[in-house]
Amino acid sequence: MRSARILLPGLALSAFFASGALATEDVKPSGAEQAEQAIAAGGEAAASPPADAQASGQEAASTDAQPSSEQTAAESNQQPAEAEQVASPAEEAVTEQAETSDTAPEHAAAEADQPSSPAEPETATAQDATDEQPAASESTAEAKPEEPVEPAATAEGPSENSEPTATAETPEAASPAETDAAKEAAAVPADAQPQAEGEPASEAPVVVEYKFQPELLKQIAEAKGLSNQDREALTAFYEARGDDLLWVEDGKFTSRAEAAMAEIRQADDWGLEASAFDLPSAPVSADPADVASTELKLSLAVLKYANHARGGRVDPRRLSNYLDRQPPLLPSSEVLAGIAAADAADAYLRGLHPRHPQFEKLRQAYLALKNGTMPDEAEEEGAAKGKSAAKKERTSKEARLRKLLVNMEQWRWMPENLGEFYIWANIPEFTLRVMRDGESVFTERIIVGKADTQTPIFSDEMETIVFHPTWGVPDSIKVKEILPGLVRGTRVLERNDLRIQYRGKDIDPSRVDWTRVDIRNYHVYQPPGARNVLGVVKFLFPNKHAVYMHDTPAKHLFQSSRRMFSHGCMRVRNPLQFASVLLAESDGWTAGKVQAAVKSGQRNNHVNLSKKIPVHITYFTAWVDDDGKLKTWSDVYGHEQRIQMGLEGKAHLIAKQNEDLGKVQAEVVGRLAETRKTWSPSSSWSSNSQPDWARRVFGQW
């Protein structure tokens, strides 16, 4: 009995801690209940205890709804191996709590592990301990729900009808081990949590390490003299390909690379310079830097070839304000994608050159002359007779080669699609044509701008035809031609049927002090009539140069071989037939309807074309006709020399004419006034007495 009494306090404390653990299990039923089920399973597998012990265990189970801690310890001592096999993390946490508690519970647990006296069974001792510790029993009863909890509760959590225990609301109820375990579980990333049974295992991302790409991208980033467009295109192109290089494979050039380099070496046959392209040699080693350098070098050569083939060697607008062309360059990204997708790299490169038939005819003439075969050449048109310089130019092989190259280069600047039906005015030829499907359906002489007031070279679209137009005098003529006469007090406006307006109202020019005003703020115009410098019709294709085509009363000027008399606009010898061709194509007009529009006399009769017609103003000085004969014309504006200098890299040496009139000073422009002594306001208006400027403007020669 003495030993039993000694054990009673320890057993009571064990029951107290067991009840606390049970209360905590209500908060976290999953781990604790699994531990109890595992211990129970181990106890059943062991030898059955005495009958009176079983009865006492059942009575304790009915009172506490859980086995006592002493019974659990006894059963665990009987089957230690099996208990270890089914021990759960929650049981390990409870054990750790018991081991880390203060000294008194440890001593009690040590006494509880000693074997009981045979005269006093375990169940009785446990029952006495329960009777002698009413406070512990009451505390346990208060912490438990009113209805007994079934030991078979699963790990899924407490029953829906169960209420949270008082211990669950007390912070001290959770042991330090359980708190640490909960923190560790919360700290585990979601993707590291165990996967549910049946779900496919997630695959870790595959990291591909490229051998050549990093070095290639580095060299692209560090390359000097590279345009932003080329750098961005190359970077995007090789980022997408990885180590799948375009030109090098297994340390050797691909067949695509061999074909591309062979075509680039023949650049001279296309009017380019093969020496301008730096082609690589095969890589000498498998070193990534060597391979990347070879790959990049050939890609740069291809991009440069594409640029030159499309007319990018020189910007024509840098050569002259009158050369208003923009070469049809391809984006670098398109070139790289195109040659990578092409079946044959050499064919792709050849396709970058102009596909206009005249370009190929000029190229064949260039190759024949280059190889020593003189092409069949017609007499140069527009050349001054008897001048040795012009004759020398015609017979000089080098000069003829330059002429052909310059004209081939101009074809690179032309729009790729001229149109099925278009208007073509070639300035050195002084000729206008209307083309349909590559064949001329109308040809006529034209008058073009003088050397100091050139007709610009550009393309646009014809939009409107105006019958009986009003001529609005451009600023250049107002400043350089009209103002000097007004300052001197001449009757230049009246004699040429010119009117002047200010803010929409006609004014008397004699009441204005022209030395103190800017004539550009005044509208000077010529109403329709027989003396109107635009004749009966004009053709508008709106452009920044303010030039157009029109009729003229001075028909005799068309007899000259070098017809350079205008301020930039183009005068057509037979404008009504020209209008009939255009209106028939656009709106189905007949020639009779055009004549009726003229006879009606309606002023400023605007007829908008239903279909806009392309207009191409060109400066070709060499042409191969249908018979294979090479025709050439004089370089009337000097553009051949400018283009040649541009191709030689000397564009910066060309002096461009400034078209800005600047601030008008009467005392300065007064020097441009009429100086011929034979002319005066009272003089008769004849070809012999007119000042030069009046004859140029109004066509009286």
Image (cartoon, helix red, strand yellow):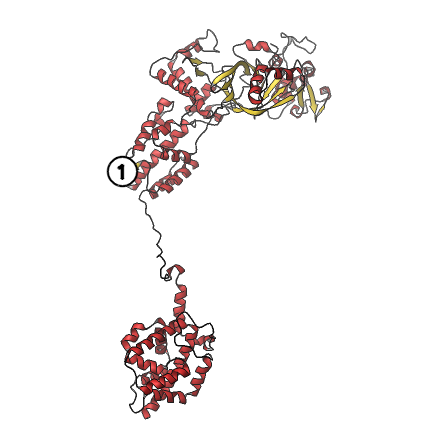
Q: Is 486 in front, or is 187?
A: 187
Q: Is 78 in front, or is 16?
A: 78
User: Would you say residue 603 is visible in this rendering?
Assistant: yes
Instruction: Tell me where residue 637 appears, x and y as whole percent.
Output: 50, 17
In the shown orientation, is residue 544 left or right of residue 627? right
Instruction: Tell me where residue 622 appears, x and y as whole percent.
Output: 44, 16
Q: Is 67 in front, or is 487?
A: 67
* SS type, badge 1: loop
In the shown orientation, is residue 684 left or right of residue 239? right
User: Would you say residue 534 is visible in this rendering?
Assistant: no
Instruction: Tell me where residue 218 appears, x and y as whole percent.
Output: 36, 42
Residue for point 43% across, 75% down: 26
Q: Quadrant of residue 106?
A: bottom left
Q: Is 33 in front, or is 415?
A: 33
The outermost residue toward the left is: 285
Q: Which residue is the site of mark 1?
A: 251
The local crowd at label 1, few if under 14, some if 14 to 19, many if 20 or more residues have their Cα within 10 Å, is some
Q: Amino acid at mark 1?
A: Gly
Q: What is the total number of numbered labels drawn onto the structure image?
A: 1
The outermost residue toward the bottom is: 1
Residue for point 55% across, 9% down: 559
190 versus 8 height, above or below = above
- Quadrant holding the C terminus: top right
Instruction: Tell me where residue 530 appears, x and y as whole percent.
Output: 66, 13
- Quadrant holding the N terminus: bottom left
Q: Quadrant of residue 565?
A: top right
Residue for point 41% across, 34% down: 334
